[in-house]
Amino acid sequence: GERVGEFGYGTTGIFNKRGEIQLNGVKKKYRGRGYSQAAFNEGENRIKKERDVKEIRINSTSQKDALHIYEKNGYVKDKRKNVSNTVSRLVGLEPMVKKVR
């Protein structure tokens, strides 16, 4: 099939206890068809299955459609003050986090 966007995930932190979704973007002509949601769910499921993570983190752009997907999936703005969050905000991203059970 044709490539509809970009997506990446991984784990970070001591003992890999934090999952991280790095890229989540769908080309404009494919937006609104559920591709981003499907890729996002798959990434989350793989992180949960592969590692015993405590939380999943994502750096969101301030685009409404991206924020909508993240909030719909239980992510909240990460208000913790740390180097990673500070750097994210300096480059115009909003750090978001979701606790994993």
Image (cartoon, rainbow, N blue to C red):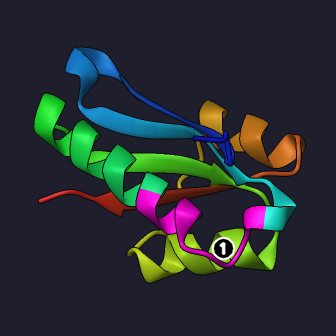
Residue 67 sits above or below residue 82 on the image: below
**Residue at point 46%, 53% (across, down):** 39
Residue pushed farthest top?
Answer: 15
Residue 97 horizontal/vertical position (percent): 45, 58
- Residue bearing mark 1: 67
Residue 82 horizontal/vertical position (percent): 58, 39
The residue nearer to you, when weighing 86 against 76, is: 76
In this rendering, would 50 be left or right of 64?
Answer: left
The residue nearer to you, when weighing 39 against 92, is: 39
In this rendering, would 5 be left or right of 28?
Answer: left
**Residue at point 24%, 49% (across, down):** 45
Rendering quarter of residue 12? top left
Rendering quarter of residue 22? top right
Residue 62 sits above or below residue 65 on the image: above
Magenta stretch holds residue 36: yes
Residue 6 sits above or below residue 40 on the image: above
Q: Would residue 52 be visible to someone looking at this image?
A: no
Magenta stretch holds residue 87: no
- Secondary element under disc 1, as helix, strand or loop, is helix
Quadrant location of the C terminus in the rendered image: bottom left
Q: Would residue 87 be visible to someone looking at this image?
A: yes
Give the magenta part as a residue range: 30-38
Total count of labels? 1
Within 10 Å of disc 1 (Cα), the crowding (few <14, some 14-19, many 20+) is: some
**Residue at point 73%, 64% (across, down):** 30
Rendering quarter of residue 84? top right
Residue 76 horizontal/vertical position (percent): 49, 72
Looking at the rendered structure, the kind of residue marked 1 is Leu
Quadrant location of the N terminus in the rendered image: top right
In this rendering, would 24 be left or right of 31?
Answer: left
**Residue at point 54%, 49% (across, down):** 58
